[in-house]
Image (cartoon, rainbow, N blue to C red):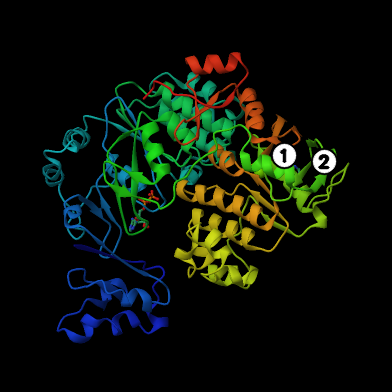
Amino acid sequence: MVRVAVVDYELCKPDKCGTPCVRFCPINRTRPYKAIELRPERGNKPVVNESFCIACGICIKKCPYKAIKIVNLPDEVERKLIHRYGPNAFKLYGLPTPSLGKIVGVLGRNGIGKTTAMRILSGELVPNFGNYSAKPSIDEVLSRFRGTELYDYFNKLYSKEIKVVHKPQNIEIIPRVAGKAVVRDVLSRLDERGVSKDVISLLYMDRFLDKRIAELSGGELQKLAIAVALCRNANVYIFDEPTSYLDIRERLRVATAIRDLIPHNAYTFVVEHDLVVLDYVSDVMVIGYGEPGVYGMFSKPYATGTGINFYLEGYLPSENMRIRDEKIVFSLHEVKEDSEYLMKTGAPMVEWSHLKKRLGSFMLEVEPGYAYQGEVIGILGPNAIGKTTFVKLLAGILKPDEGYTTASMFRISYKPQYLERSIPKCETVEDCLAKVNKEALSPSSWLFHEVVRRLNIDRFLHRRVEELSGGELQKFYVAACLIKDADVYLLDEPSTHVDVEDQLGVARAIKRIARIRKAVVFVVDHNLVLLDYAVDRAMVFLGEPTKMGLALSPRPIGESLNEFLKELGVTFRRDPRTGRPRMNKPGSYLDRYQKSIGAYFYSKPIETEEE
Ligand code: ADP
Ligand code: ADP
Ligand code: MG
């Protein structure tokens, strides 16, 4: 067995806890050597000596800040070790296999080493094979890869035979280095392939070509970063999370642009949490798994469709590895059986009349509608079309200029789109959640099971809210919203920054809360898989972004998706095995067939010959 001990030095506070991890360690107490000790070079914080540790778990339990994690791995895994950031830090085993002329999709939880792997494959980070004290030479690295399929790749990479373009995950830093530049100039200056016209039209960038980078919205910045990558002449293209900040329409455009514009003989990697995009864009895919923050490894390449199905089923056959206990199954029918049941037996609860609301130069109109007890209503549409405005009308934060809603007669729980990091008078996640509903923190309660556990919040209950990562902060707010005792739940974009595993958790939690509490949930989101899974009926928002929005009455999710996709001119089918929605290739037989019969969202399962 190999022992991997990871200490989160941000959580560790030895001056506050009296270091029970060191004092209670049975090895420290009974042997002449130490399995865990405070080290000056770590700021007098504990370092676990993995060769002496027996993984008894006492330090893990004693640590009041939950800063220590220890796992055992089979010996043969150690041979695959590629990188470790330092002593008691995250370990990366293996890399996604590059494939010439193919787009390799990379899927996996946050903290599993995807970005680390992309930095190694781009040459930004030289792997140390666990020897973090001595930086290995290029020759050493190459000799470690000799005889593997990675050798050829790294040989070309290090001898500069191939050039890499890397669209990083955190695009937020771009304005800091190039804020003054104008989008049009940047594109023309960096266009080495003469494709900027195509990129601009595929990504619909005309509207902001004359803006400076510092003035761009998150979505515009993302599109620019992708456009620049596509304009470069390279042999390796890496896109780390290309759909953050984008609405559904833009996500599908990005997927199409990457597929259409990547040169045919390049190595391409796309790390992505939106299953529809990943599915459409990749030729093959690898699944990252392991223990977030502790260690990560990658599966062999799978054909994309099959790989996503294995992922949803929670089992990787080539690796003989179970990655989840539960299967995730989608409904295969246009109207889900349980939604239909709800509409037959449920009573309408929240109602709204025809509504009008003007905000500055923006005008929103809403068709009348109502929601049943126990129902989940999805809200879908592009950015700046009035989705948040509608949710605020329901929440009573905004008053309509014309019309009424009955939502304010009920107890409301609201998760806004933009989240605050500082919450007055509560420090840790646990404190804050306890203030909302104490019961949800008791491990025997249904709320703990359906929300706290399902969203994996039990892993960071002790952390301070201001220190959470983007995905953790989002999950914390979603949980705080869902555990509150209320009749109407309003969730504005709950999947932002959340990894694919937790998106599915959020989708299930939303549905369970609605059903168990007989409450109404409204959810705005850009993730079609989440919407399709959780939602009974949906409201489509049409119109012209920033000018005027028209919200249609709720209709069964299949019908709504049909309407929405028709607007976009793309078609979807359902996967026959798991029922998940999949986008058809534009101009393919299915695409043409479905358009001809007006079935943009085709709910009958169809076998395809693609795979
Ligand atoms: P992913 O992209 O899958 O979310 P990352 O590769 O970003 O995962 O991170 C994997 C783990 O490595 C995380 O626990 C992260 O905290 C840790 N990590 C990332 N960069 C560093 C670094 N420079 N030093 C130490 N640990 C790091
Ligand atoms: P969505 O949630 O669909 O992205 P929003 O409802 O947030 O859209 O916004 C719709 C439009 O209304 C946007 O163009 C936004 O800039 C504008 N808007 C929102 N709030 C205000 C306000 N208080 N004053 C003026 N304009 C606003
Ligand atoms: Mg919004």
Point 56% across, 68% down: residue: 445
- Residue lying at the far right in this picture: please name it: 402
Q: Which of the marked residues, 1 or 2, is nearer the chain's N terminus?
A: 2
Which circle marks residue 357 in the picture?
Answer: 2
Question: Can you identify the residue that label 1 sits on?
Answer: 386
Q: Position of residue 567 (x, y in %)?
A: 65, 24
The residue tagged with tag 2: helix, strand or loop?
Answer: strand
Q: Position of residue 284 (x, y in %)?
A: 34, 31
Residue toward you, 314 or 401: 314
- Mark 1: is the Cβ under 8 angstroms from ligand 2? yes
Q: Position of residue 353 (x, y in %)?
A: 85, 41
Choose top left, top right, bottom left or bottom right for residue 318: top left
Q: Is residue 605 left or right of residue 559?
A: left
Q: Where 207 sits versus 54, above or below?
A: above
The answer to whether mark 1 and mark 2 are in CB contact below 8 A is yes
The answer to whether residue 5 of the structure is visible from this angle is: yes
The residue tagged with tag 1: helix, strand or loop?
Answer: loop
Residue toward you, 560 or 50: 560
Q: Position of residue 40 (x, y in %)?
A: 27, 76
Q: CA distance from mark 1 to mark 2?
A: 9 Å
Task: Tell me the quarter of the image containing the C terminus.
Answer: top left
The amino acid type of the residue labelled 2 equals Lys
The answer to whether residue 180 of the structure is visible from this angle is: no
The amino acid type of the residue labelled 1 equals Gly
Q: Residues within 10 Å of mark 1 (few under 14, many from 20)?
A: many
Residue toward you, 19 or 167: 19
Q: Is residue 330 left or right of residue 134?
A: right
Choose top left, top right, bottom left or bottom right for residue 332: top right
Task: Tell me the quarter of the image containing the N terminus.
Answer: bottom left
Numbered-mark total:
2
